[in-house]
Image (cartoon, rainbow, N blue to C red):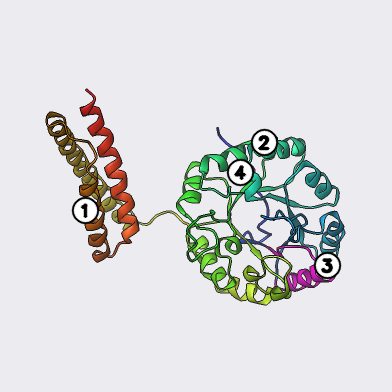
Amino acid sequence: MELDLQPLNLMGAENKRPFVIAGPCSAETQEQVMKTARLLASKGCRIFRAGIWKPRTKPGGFEGMGEQGLPWMKQVKEETGMMIATEVATPKHVEAALNAGLDVLWVGARTTANPFAMQELADSLRGVDVPVLVKNPVNPDIELWIGALERINGAGIKRLGAIHRGFSSIDQKLYRNAPMWHIPIELHRRYPNLPIICDPSHIGGRRDLIAPLCQQAMDMGFEGLIVESHCCPDSAWSDAKQQVQPEVLDFILDRLVIRDSQEETESLTALRRQIDELDDTLMNLLTKRMRISREIAAYKKQHNMTVVQTGRYSEILDKRGAQGSLCGMDPDFVKKVYEAIHEESVRQQMEIINK
């Protein structure tokens, strides 16, 4: 399904990349909201964000001020001239936010993962002209993400954007949520006109990771950033570790290198031609490898052997992973490549065995 899109028009008069949405994780008090907003406005921020309703993993945590915080957001808009944005998860949230004059709405990762909730939100937005940003679902499922975008677009929302906030993982490594950059890259490949915004706060989970993640997003051509910024982050009521002070955010943004996205040069074309030639060679080699796999399958069938030989499979993974490391490649990457090759090899061998 094609998305019927119009420009978000959030980039300001100078139309520079990136546009930035910044503000605290949660609207806690009127004083905290206004102090943070004034600081951000003084640094040139055009869009202020704050969570009015906060979905929490477990009950008992701070779940936002609710509608009590909406007048504070209106005050931000009236006093600073910034656009105001918040997360919505239910039709009631949508109604209250729109009545309060919110300029931008976004949908959180937990809501995106629920098609029923997404359809309810879409229905509540029908007939409304407001920019809506949809975060990726908590699990790495691009089809679920696209489905959520399609539901909102199907309700007539044409000013639509996607927010990449990373994906939950049992393996807790460097990041709070694994970036899995290939997923937003694939989303951009399918929908080149869909703006993608990076949320380095939720990907990193730590303020020292905000700067490098912002730069990575710019290097990949993302249109904007949504960053959590608090006037006193250490005392924040939610997600304190991933929020930065407005002056720190200004420092980070000032040092971003924005890559040129112009048409390719002759030199780049020549290098890409080399890549194409190497890809052709890889395909030829894979074809030969699969032919030998089918010959092995015929031998196994003749001698009544099982298709999968776990010892041999482990040997391949260990050997090629070590070899990849020596060649300057990530062993996990090499392992994934050979797992995919082995999966296809097994599929083709099963066809021979079952004939």
Residue indicated by mark 2: 116
Distance from Cα at disc 1 to Cα at disc 3 = 60 Å
Q: Residue at x 64, y 48 (%)?
A: 110
User: Which of 250 and 44 lies nearest the eye of the viewer?
Assistant: 250
Residue type, numbered disc 3: Thr
- State yes or no: residue 27 in magenta: yes
Q: Is residue 105 left or right of residue 262?
A: right
Distance from Cα at disc 3 to Cα at disc 4 = 30 Å
Which mark is first along the chain, 3 or 2? 3
Q: Is residue 157 above or below residue 177?
A: above
Q: Is residue 17 above or below residue 132?
A: below
Residue 130 position within the rendered picture, expressed as x and y whole percent measured from the top left? 74, 46
* Residue 17 showing in the rendered view: no
Residue type, numbered disc 2: Phe
Residue type, numbered disc 4: Ala
User: Which of 332 and 265 lies nearest the eye of the viewer?
Assistant: 332
Residue indicated by mark 3: 29
Q: Is residue 281 above or below residue 64?
A: above
